[in-house]
Image: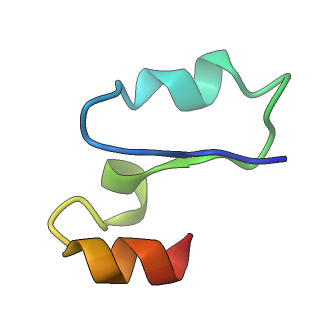
Amino acid sequence: MKLLFDHNLSPRLVDRLADMYPNSQHLFLISLDQADDLTVWEYA
């Protein structure tokens, strides 16, 4: 399982939880931090 972290959570969680949830992403790190909800939903 991998996670997609939203704006209200720190991008640092990606590294901190990498052992338990590899390949997780944060919206900021994949350049979706300014995207609308529909775009984020489609990516997820």
Q: Position of residue 29 (x, y in %)?
A: 40, 52
Q: Quadrant of the C terminus?
A: bottom right
Residue that extends furthest to the left in the rendered view of this protein: 34
Is residue 44 rendered to the left or right of residue 23? left
Is residue 23 rendered to the left or right of residue 33? right
Viewer-closest of 44 and 30? 44
Is residue 20 rendered to the left or right of residue 39? right
Q: What residue is at 52 percent from the left and 23 percent from the top?
A: 13
Q: Position of residue 37 (x, y in %)?
A: 26, 71
Q: Quadrant location of residue 39?
A: bottom left
Location of residue 31 with respect to 25 vertically, above or below: below
Q: What residue is at 48 percent from the left and 83 percent from the top?
A: 42
What is the number of callouts on the image?
0
Q: What residue is at 21 percent from the left and 73 percent from the top?
A: 35
Location of residue 32 with respect to 4 vertically, above or below: below
Q: How is the image coloured?
A: rainbow
Location of residue 19 with respect to 2 vertically, above or below: above
Q: Quadrant location of residue 27?
A: bottom left
Residue that extends furthest to the top in the rendered view of this protein: 16
Q: Position of residue 3 (x, y in %)?
A: 64, 45
